[in-house]
Amino acid sequence: PAGDNLGESLAEQAKQVASGFEQGKFAPGVGYGNVYLSYVNPRSEWREVVPINKSGILGRLKKLAKKYEAFWSEAQAVHFILTGKACPITPARVRFKLNSYGIHKVTLEVSPHLTGDNVRSLYIKGRQKLFQVLKTDRNSRRISEKHIQLAVFAVKENGSWVYKMKKWNVKNPQWKYNNSSNFARDCKTAYRRVTGWKWEE
């Protein structure tokens, strides 16, 4: 029924429905199933979720947004469709899943153009976020901010331990080292605690 201007019609109708929700004309959840649409609230810029009728106009918007899943989350795709404003396309996504049996997972979606070191750094950060949520680490002890920074720094920086230590001291004077052996030891320990892997030269 939209004729040749399906995209414009879809966006216009979706804006009207979204405006209706904001003005209280519609009651979210009434007469709706368990289908939800994510969107970016233009006022707060936070992601929000609303129950929708999958056979209605917002259901069509959800299907259209799915075509962009390789680039953005559903909320970002909806934002792009309705406003024309594109969020930056990230070369990687890091997520984690919690499991009631304690089998938690860190999930990476990465561009094949990222280096191994980039992927390793992303995993370390994702794992740390997971432990922050769980409020524990693999050894049932919290990992300090210093050790997190040491693990990431050791992976990112190249060169000898003496060179790395000097660079570390410039960036982190509050955690300054005077002995490169102690610095290397702490980096390796931090890396093992954060990733669960032994440091390999």
Image (cartoon, grey):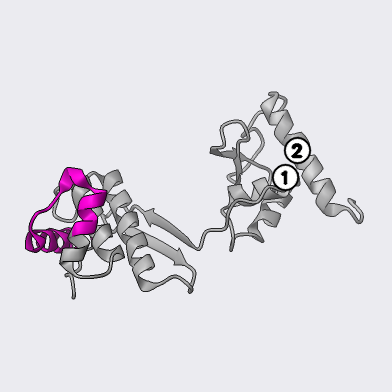
Q: Which residue position holds label 1?
A: 82
Foreground pick, 23 / 195:
195
Q: Amino acid at mark 2?
A: Lys
* Element under disc 1: helix
Q: Amino acid at mark 1?
A: Leu
Which residue appears at 14% of the width and 48% of the height?
141
Foreground pick, 144 / 33:
144
Q: Is residue 49 left or right of 188 when viewed as pictured?
A: right
Q: Quick one: which residue is furthest to the top in this view?
A: 24
Q: Which residue position holds label 2?
A: 15
Main SS of the magenta segment? helix
**Where does the image place residue 111, in percent across and percent down from the top left?**
49, 69
- Residue 88 shows in the view: yes
Does 28 sit above or below residue 124? above
Question: Residue 193 magenta-drawn?
Answer: yes
The range drawn in magenta is 166-194
Which residue appears at 72% of the width and 25% of the height?
25
Q: Earlier in the sequence, mark 2 or mark 1?
A: 2
Q: Is residue 150 left or right of 108 when viewed as pictured?
A: left
**Where does the image place residue 104, in percent across and percent down from the top left?**
30, 57
Tag 2 near tag 1, CB within 8 Å: yes
Quadrant of the drawing holding the C terminus:
bottom left
